[in-house]
Image (tube, coloured by chain):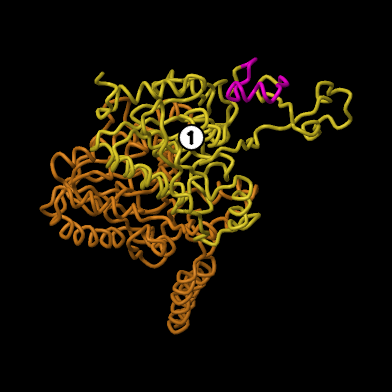
Amino acid sequence: MKNLDFEKPILDLNEKIEQLKELSKEGNIDLTEEIKKIEKRAAKLKTEIYSNLSPIQIIKIARHIDRPDTTSLINLIFENFIELHGDRLYGDDPAIVGGVAMLGKTRVVVMGHQKGHTTKENIHRNFGMPNPEGYRKALRLMNLADKFNMPVITFIDTPGAYPGIEAEERGQAEAIARNLKEMSGLQVPVISFIIGEGGSGGALGLGVANKVYMLEYSIYSVISPEGCASILFRDATKANIAAQNLKITAKDIIGLGVADDAIKEPIGGAHNNWGETAANIKKKIVADISILSRLTGEKLAENRYKKFRQMGKFQ
Amino acid sequence: MISDWNFSSRIKTMSILNWFPKKQKTNNEKSKLSIPGDLWVKCFKCGDIIYLKDLESNQKVCVKCNYHFRLTPEERISHILDKNTFNELETEISPIDTLGFSDSKPYKTRIQEAQKKTGRKDAMVIGIGKINKTPINIGFMDFAFLGGSMGAVVGEKTTRLIELAIKNKNPLVIFTASGGARMQEGILSLMQMAKTSAALKALDKQKVPFISVLCDPTTGGTTASFAMLGDILISEPDALITFAGPRVIEQTIRQKLPEGFQRAEFLLEHGIIDMVVERKDLKETIANLVMVLNPNNMRAKE
């Protein structure tokens, strides 16, 4: 699924352009005008398609195999990233990466869910689905940040915490719950970016932050639309209806007050230009750290508490 | 003050005819046949036919196989709290359909049906009551209300109960029974996990003990937030306590799960909960724990 199905009209035009170019070369005919026209049309079509995406189309971009991953973004945004390993209790979870790095003159702790770009990588990373030791490693790194007064940056990209036998045996629920509790009390700035899939509690386990941002074509959901469809509609093929109902796009999540802002992606999605995506994220981090660093640790924790305290509507 | 006994939907009424199932034509619908009065129930585990009054007098635990039937908040209140000491709080908070969610039924209809069925606004009952004369901030989830799922109301009431404990310093006890986050409230239901967990972080500073009693079943986002954050974690025998449900795990790993997987005894064995306590001993166990843990308790100084 390297190509997205809804991009087919654009790809068709691109193919036509290639054919014309070939033709003009072979036949020595000047087709520059025609090519220009079609190129213009393709660009317009792309803008049109991307300004009218349905939730299910956005999900496809959010899960794109070439979408920039956490480690790549870390290396594009920060300098001197040193990866740290293990939860000191059981093992090292490849589905969550983290470590220390520099952002200009600022020392930071960075971490995030790690997906792969090939099947082999994805199997190694468990498709970005952490086990308890992943969350415990993340918490260890957050405590490190707290101790040495470093801001915490998290990148969220997971279908969810791993639903497996060993995960349950080692306390998946406890690991996530503890992260939610401890993150709320951190005395340093915490900034989270949902870069692809924000899947349920497995995502939130890295997401109790002062500022929560979503990439333009990322999603954040209490349950995967497929899971929701199979439970509530008793039909997994109704994922598109479930996706619409669940309100999972950046625009919806910001509207509900759960995310603060969206990060612009290159046209056609982040997978088309990792550098530009990283630069857009970096701008936000730099701006936020300079604002949040002025607050005391107490105030930062209080702000975080208040932010989540007011979420949820009732009468 | 709640006192009426409302039998949970888990109990199917039976007639005497069910003693002779082979003679019935509609064998698979036998549980629907009943004589007026609903005097008999069938145990879900051993299949034994039990006289309802016997079951009630045994706190709804099967005399034969020790199966612990699921309970309503009212039944819990009558088992756990001193008589007539429960003062229910925040009874008027009720859910709204923020997303305009609709699956086979609109969420609004589901709310109305659940409210009619249970006689309460949502799946959480909170208040102050006494256990052996000690005032306790106490909460009970109702699995009969949309599977005890946690939406904004459950999250808010749980948080208010924790905040009450921060203020009045009385011990906190919560009985959970929940299918997890409420899908129909989308991302806002997920955020209740963060909200309740953050409130418990604030409670830590006050040195108020929190005892979490995980009842059958406690799953998903409820387990992965306040339910797992008790200073002490207690469960009843055979209660299902999970992050991911057994069906989801089976679909993921494509193999059958071992017997007893994710049951209370399994969690005890794996070091995840402190103890499995039979229903008849729950009140005394909680009373003792509260007495020992609570720094403000006068009884501990005697």
Q: Residue furthest front?
A: B84
Relative to A109, residue A274 above or below: below
Position of the C terminus of chain B, as image quadrant, is top left
The image position of residue B127, as x and y in percent, is: 43, 41
Relative to A102, residue B255 above or below: above
Which residue is nearer to you in this view: A238 or B180? B180
What residue would you read off at disc 1? B84
Would residue A120 be seen by someone viewing this image from the given angle? yes
The chain whose colour is orange is: A
The image position of residue A164, as x and y in percent, is: 48, 31
Q: Amino acid at mark 1?
A: Asn
Relative to A66, residue A264 above or below: below
The image position of residue B166, as x and y in percent, is: 29, 41
The image quadrant of residue B294 is top left
- Count up the numbered dots: 1
Which residue is nearer to you in this view: B121 or B223? B121
The image position of residue A38, as x and y in percent, is: 48, 78
Relative to A99, residue B301 above or below: above
The image quadrant of residue B108 is bottom right
The chain whose colour is yellow is: B
On the rendered structure, is A142 left or right of B61? left
In reply to whether residue B7 is colored magenta, the answer given is: no
State which chain disc 1 sits on. Answer: B
Residue stretch in magenta: B48-65
User: Residue, x 58% and y 34% (percent of image)?
Assistant: B247
Q: Residue furthest top?
A: B64
**Mark 1, secondary structure of its residue:** loop
Q: Residues within 10 Å of mark 1 (few under 14, many from 20)?
A: few
Would residue A180 be seen by someone viewing this image from the given angle? no
